[in-house]
Image (cartoon, rainbow, N blue to C red):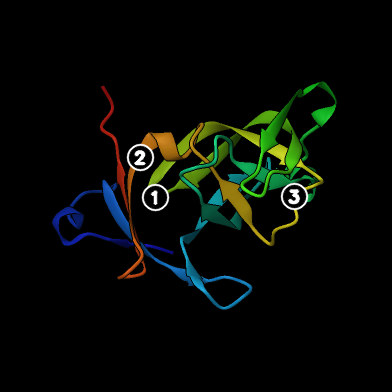
Amino acid sequence: MGRTSAGSRNRALPRQIEFPYLKDAQGRYAPIVYLQVWTGNRWLYLQAYVDSGASWSVFHMDVAQLLRINLSRAKRRYVSLGNGSVLPIYLQRIRVRFAGAEFTAQAGFSDALRMGFILMGRAGFVNRFSMCFNDRARLLTVTRFSRK
């Protein structure tokens, strides 16, 4: 899942957590983490690829069904991917647990997403934390911002 830094072991909710990179489908190490989403009666564990260059977090439409989300009234947006293709997404707020924090975040859902995991982008997710990607050590260090 993730491990807390030595300086925060005595706190109930650690501010800094380290996530060792996991192997992707091609066997390459990548910043893939676990998060939890609320289904209405239980927490569901999912894998997410942390992409600091992505504007939105995008889940496959199957996840919306698992979460019992009705997307008929959701806002439709289009996002551009790194390969130049455009992905239609439907925005919805969801309850999430990640890196010792529980929060509500805006996420996109799309049936055009062709990855085996969620794409975790800036809006609602990455912008809540300071993230340090250490590709050499294959380690993602996540620090929660203090509430003001």
Q: Which is in the foreground here, disc 2 or disc 3?
A: 3
Residue drawn at the location 62% of the way across and 35% of the way down:
107
The answer to which of marks 2 and 3 sits earlier in the sequence is 3
Dots 1, 2 in contact, CB < 8 A:
yes
Q: Earlier in the sequence, mark 1 or mark 2?
A: 1
- Read off the residue under disc 1: 99
Contact (CB < 8 A) between labels 3 and 1? no
Q: Circle 2 sits in a helix, a strand or a loop, which is it?
A: strand
Asked if 123 appears above or below 36 in the picture, the reply is above
Q: Is residue 66 left or right of residue 37?
A: right
Q: Secondary structure at mark 1?
A: loop
Q: Is residue 98 left or right of 63 when viewed as pictured?
A: left
- Which of these two is toward me, 26 or 35? 26
Instruction: Decide which of 16, 54 is in the foreground and name it.
Output: 54
Residue with the most extreme front position: 84
Local secondary structure at mark 3: loop
Farthest residue, direction bottom: 27
Left or right of residue 34: residue 39: right
Q: Which residue is mark 2?
A: 129
Task: Identify the residue shown where x is 81% and y is 21%.
Answer: 73
Q: Label 3 belongs to which residue?
A: 113
Nearest to the eye among marks 3 and 1: give it: 3
Q: Look at 58% across and 36% down and name the residue there.
A: 56
Q: Earlier in the sequence, mark 3 or mark 1?
A: 1
Name the residue located 36 percent from the left edge and 65 percent from the top edge: 135
